[in-house]
Amino acid sequence: MSTLTCISPIDGSVFATRDTLSRTAAQDVLASARIAQTAWAARPLQDRINLVMAGVAAIGAMNDDIVPELAHMMGRPIRYGGEFGGFEERASHMAKIAKDSLADIEVGEDATFKRYIKRVPHGVVFVVAPWNYPYMTAINTVAPALIAGNTVVLKHATQTLLVGERMAQAFHDAGVPEDVFQNVFLDHDMTSALIADNAFDFVNFTGSVGGGAAMEHAAAGTFTGVGTELGGKDPGYVMEDADLDAAVDTLIDGAMFNSGQCCCGIERIYVHESLFDAFVEKAIATVNAYKLGNPLNPDTTLGPMAHKRFADEVRAQIAEAVAAGATAHIDTFAEDDDGAYLSPQILTNVTHDMRVMRDESFGPVVGIMPVKDDLEAIRLMNDSEFGLTASLWTKDVDRAAAVGDQIETGTVFMNRAD
């Protein structure tokens, strides 16, 4: 057994600690979840939907406490109001589509056979959620898993240590049985050991590439399903016919919001050479208008990064790029403390030889490069080990679709970003 400690990025103080479960205690949790699953799955679908949505509403009732709590744990400014809008929207969508999505698939029948595929719950679903959007990323799996008749065991990131407790308490208060949705505190070794023991029927992980690899490694040979959403180096591409103001507003916000700590944040931008200078000028003005500071201050638009070590990695990428010839356009903000409070940065004269254009930054920095045409943009966008989302800016839908078909990424947006 060990202790998990959440260090607040606001001032470096200890915000919360929790002891991890012993192996015996963890096994007891899983045993109770497995026993409870049969009765939970036997409930009518609408009952499960109603209970899940009541749990969602209970989280909403806590929002005034949750927003400053998130600021303390991971640094998001209170002015943005937390995540409840997206949290509720995602759960509501899952509830709305549940009946059709969980219905039997009719294959066909004749005088001899009736053929159909029946959807049944996995059993016990393990959700390992990240700190950057701790409520929305968790509900992505918690809501559909519970609605489908699974029991859920949630393990949250240490940086957002209290989120799982709040979610479990809210759902229990709403009537979801305690053994059906449980929050646990586990260290990495125990997490891997439980997965390797085939303790779960499905594992969902959102986080780093290294974390996802550890999950898959632990599950190897167990035949447990593992779903992952991992790192990104998401590109934006601004074509010569784009709405320049809209492209700047969205792509720079996509790069800097939440101090750049977004799963699908924009990390590199390619701009047609005819718009490049104007785009960079407007981007610099946008970033210089940000207010870096204490996230509990309503005037703050850019809070600290969630931990000093995250900020140090971004500083290292920027310093390496500048040393290799990149141009940094944003002067150091007065509030930059060489710790978790990090100045945002825009870089030009960047190349793909630089880590800042290859490795995930996950911070408030973006490199911007001019391109001559679609072919060059496609080549550069695909020159990456990552493939999460891409954002294309043009007035021509057919052109965007044609370019999108050639990008090696999971999702392509036109004239918007995630």
Image (cartoon, rainbow, N blue to C red):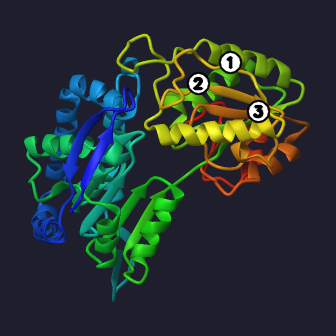
Does residue 24 appear in this view? yes
Q: At 40% from the left edge and 39% from the top edge, which residue is drawn? A: 133
Q: Residues within 10 Å of mark 2 (few under 14, many from 20)?
A: many
Of marks 3 and 2, the one in the foreground: 2
Q: Nearer the viewer, residue 237 or 13?
A: 13
Sequence-wise first label, 3 or 2: 2
Q: At 38% from the left edge and 12% from the top edge, which residue is drawn? A: 298
Q: At 49% from the left edge and 31% from the top edge, which residue is drawn? A: 339
Relative image position of residue 294 (x, y in whole percent): 41, 19
Which label number is shown at residue 331?
A: 1
Of marks 3 and 1, the one in the foreground: 1
Relative image position of residue 245 (x, y in whole percent): 70, 17
- Identify the element where label 3 is drawn: strand
The kind of residue tagged 3 is Ile
The kind of residue tagged 1 is Asp
Label 3 to label 1: alpha-carbon separation = 17 Å
Sequence-wise first label, 3 or 1: 1
The kind of residue tagged 2 is Ser
Q: Is residue 322 left or right of residue 132?
A: right
Relative image position of residue 30 (x, y in whole percent): 17, 68
All told, the count of numbered labels is 3
The residue beneath circle 2 is 343
- Identify the element where label 2 is drawn: loop
The residue beneath circle 3 is 368
Q: Measured along the vertical axis of the image, is residue 285 above or below residue 52?
A: above
Q: Quadrant of the N terminus?
A: bottom left
Sequence-wise first label, 2 or 1: 1
Q: Residues within 10 Å of mark 3 (few under 14, many from 20)?
A: many
